[in-house]
């Protein structure tokens, strides 16, 4: 059994590494998309593509009718409004104003703030590793936001771009905590699919008001970004991540998230010619170390 299992395990690790690469690439694709497409239209088109794929995968993999209670419908709707609607509109708004590499390092704090909010709202225990991870990760985020000058926070030396990306973190934390309640009876794939559809439907009216149906045709590069964000950054990323959790456990799978800001910074330097500053490098290292400590702390807890 062991020789047969080894290629499968290796394939799982490869897919998790590719997942981190795809998620890192979303910042580069989002940065490009934000320059030519409005945030509501871009978010709608991304999740229109993703929702069609997710529904097809859900029907193929689960092969059963999913019955939802009124409470589940309400929670999934709010998940769609936070993790799909708000997150992606703020994501594109932020990436229009700040570099992809900086945005990725700020958003990489998601697991840390999820752990902190889970302790506040669900009573999950904070041990030494978790607390250390939170402090280190926040220090990394502050380093990136302030360009290595934390004292500038007192004078408000960061702009709307950083605030939008911080809003992404808040939206994703809300989405994830809501997911903890609904995924006790729904599979992760079903929860992601239904919330994606709900968010897509809600994004359509503001996208139309923004000029989705009447504006000038989008350039080919924008469509490439939309397909990448929808298929690779959303569908394959989520499906492979949850497959990894099933096969090797949430702790080992979660550690691959540490590669996301690293890949994003690398791609932003190579593809967008963004500067690799000392504050960005130090911040990325601190955030990755903090997320790693928090993940290991969750395992011990």
Image: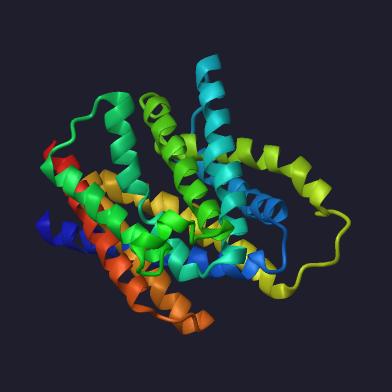
Instruction: Give the vertical position of 270 relative to 77 (above or below).
Output: below
Q: How many marks?
A: 0
Please say which color scheme the image uses.
rainbow
Instruction: Give the vertical position of 240 relative to 37 (above or below).
Output: above
> Furthest-front residue in view?
155
Question: In terms of depth relative to the viewer, which is nearer, 264 or 54?
Answer: 264
Question: In terms of depth relative to the viewer, which is nearer, 67 or 296?
Answer: 296
Residue 270 in view:
yes
Report the side of 278 relative to 226 (left or right). Answer: left
Q: Position of residue 85 (x, y in %)?
A: 61, 43
> Furthest-top residue in view?
70
Q: Position of residue 275 (x, y in %)?
A: 45, 81
Instruction: Give the vertical position of 168 relative to 20 (above or below).
Output: above
- For the C terminus, give its image quadrant: top left
> Furthest-right residue in view?
214
At 77% across and 68% down in the image, what residue appears? 218
Residue 53 in view:
no
Q: Position of residue 57 (x, y in %)?
A: 51, 46
Residue 220 placement: quadrant: bottom right
At 37% across and 56% down in the image, what residue appears? 108
Question: In terms of depth relative to the viewer, which is nearer, 84 or 169?
Answer: 169
- For the N terminus, give its image quadrant: bottom left
Residue 33 placement: quadrant: bottom right
Residue 176 placement: quadrant: top left
At 42% across and 26% down in the image, what residue appears? 182
Q: Position of residue 82 (x, y in %)?
A: 54, 38
């Amino acid at each position: 059994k062991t020789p047969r299992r080894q290629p499968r395990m290796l394939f799982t690790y490869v897919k998790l590494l590719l997942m981190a690469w795809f998620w890192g690439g979303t910042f580069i694709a989002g940065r490009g998309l934000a320059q030519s497409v409005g945030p509501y239209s871009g978010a709608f088109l991304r999740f229109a593509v993703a929702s069609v794929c997710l529904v097809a995968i859900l029907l193929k993999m689960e092969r059963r009718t999913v019955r939802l209670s009124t409470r589940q419908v309400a929670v999934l709707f709010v998940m769609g409004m936070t993790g799909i609607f708000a997150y992606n509109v703020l994501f594109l708004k932020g990436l229009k104003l700040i570099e992809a590499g900086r945005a990725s390092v700020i958003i990489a704090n998601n697991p840390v703030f999820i752990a902190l909010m889970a302790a506040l709202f669900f009573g999950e225990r904070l041990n030494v590793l978790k607390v250390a991870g939170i402090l280190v990760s926040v220090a990394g985020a502050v380093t990136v936001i302030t360009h290595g000058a934390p004292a500038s926070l007192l004078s408000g030396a960061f702009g709307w771009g950083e605030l939008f990306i911080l809003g992404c973190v808040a939206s994703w934390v809300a989405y994830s905590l809501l997911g903890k309640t609904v995924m006790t009876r729904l599979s992760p794939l079903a929860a992601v699919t239904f919330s994606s559809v709900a968010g897509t439907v809600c994004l359509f009216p503001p996208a139309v008001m923004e000029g989705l149906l009447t504006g000038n045709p989008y350039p080919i590069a924008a469509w490439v970004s939309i397909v990448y964000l929808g298929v690779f950054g959303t569908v394959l990323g989520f499906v492979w991540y949850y497959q990894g959790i099933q096969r090797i456990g949430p702790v080992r799978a979660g550690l691959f998230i540490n590669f996301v800001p690293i890949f994003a910074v690398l791609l932003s330097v190579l593809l967008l010619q963004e500067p690799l500053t000392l504050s960005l490098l130090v911040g990325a290292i601190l955030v990755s170390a903090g997320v790693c400590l928090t993940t290991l702390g969750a395992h011990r807890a």
